[in-house]
Amino acid sequence: MKPSPPLRLVTDPAAVLHQRSRPVRIFDANLRRLVDEMYVRCEEWSGVGLAGPQVGLNLQLAVIVYEDRKFVICNPELLSASGEVDAVEGCLSLPGRAGMIRRYQQVTVRYRNVHGRGVVRSFEGWLARIVQHESDHLLGMLCPERLAPGATFQEVVDDEEAEESEAR
């Protein structure tokens, strides 16, 4: 069997980022290998989550790597949500840009894990935000479509860069 090439990050305006992904139907060793590579790439690219469309796959699959948590969501469905919070958010597929994004503070989601088992789980705070962000990717939505009222999605200037430009 010929080894597959490493996954590559897909950036906007790639079409796969703007279309609804197909549900995962086969939960096998190939899926587990793909998930393992997605974990590696997510960490390599300094992400907290990585969805199938971001690596060019039209699959409802995302990995989440946040603090001491690491898990997979396949075919997620939002069951309930409460509380809205605005926070700055960026995206690996929209490099160098960020904006104030409105998300739910708490969500309950039904999804399948990497083995195909159904899971219903509630998430709060940043973990809820990450799950919503990755789930949006599977629906063909990018975070600028969730901007808080009056917010913009724009180039990020780090503090060091801003100081250098002010000094000039």
Image (spheres, rainbow, N blue to C red):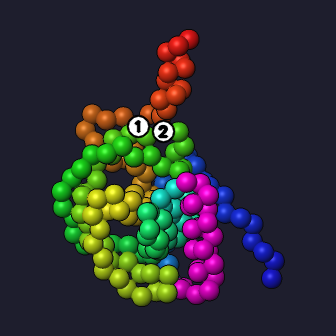
Q: Is residue 160 above or below residue 153?
A: above
Is 77 or 34 nearer to us in this picture?
34
Instruction: Residue 50: tell me if it is visible.
Output: yes
Q: Is residue 147 visible?
A: no
Q: Which mark is residue 153?
A: 1
Q: Position of residue 20 (x, y in %)?
A: 45, 63
Q: Position of residue 162 (x, y in %)?
A: 49, 23
**Does the stretch in magenta take in 96?**
no
The residue that appears at 43% across and 40% down in the rendered structure is 98
Give the residue number, with chain letter if any, for mark 2: 97
Q: CA distance from mark 1 to mark 2?
A: 6 Å
- Of 50 and 67, the residue lying toward us: 67
Q: Which quadrant holds the C terminus?
A: top right
Residue at image location 55% in from the left, 47% down from the top: 12
| Kind of residue at badge 1 | Phe
The first of marks 1 and 2 along the sequence is 2
Q: Amino acid at mark 2?
A: Arg
Identify the image quadrant of residue 135.
bottom left
Circle 2 packing at 10 Å, graded few (<14), some (14-19), many (20+), is some
For residue 145, side relative to residue 37 (left or right): left
Q: Is residue 17 above or below residue 35?
A: above
- The image shows residue 21 at horizontal and vertical percentages of 48, 67
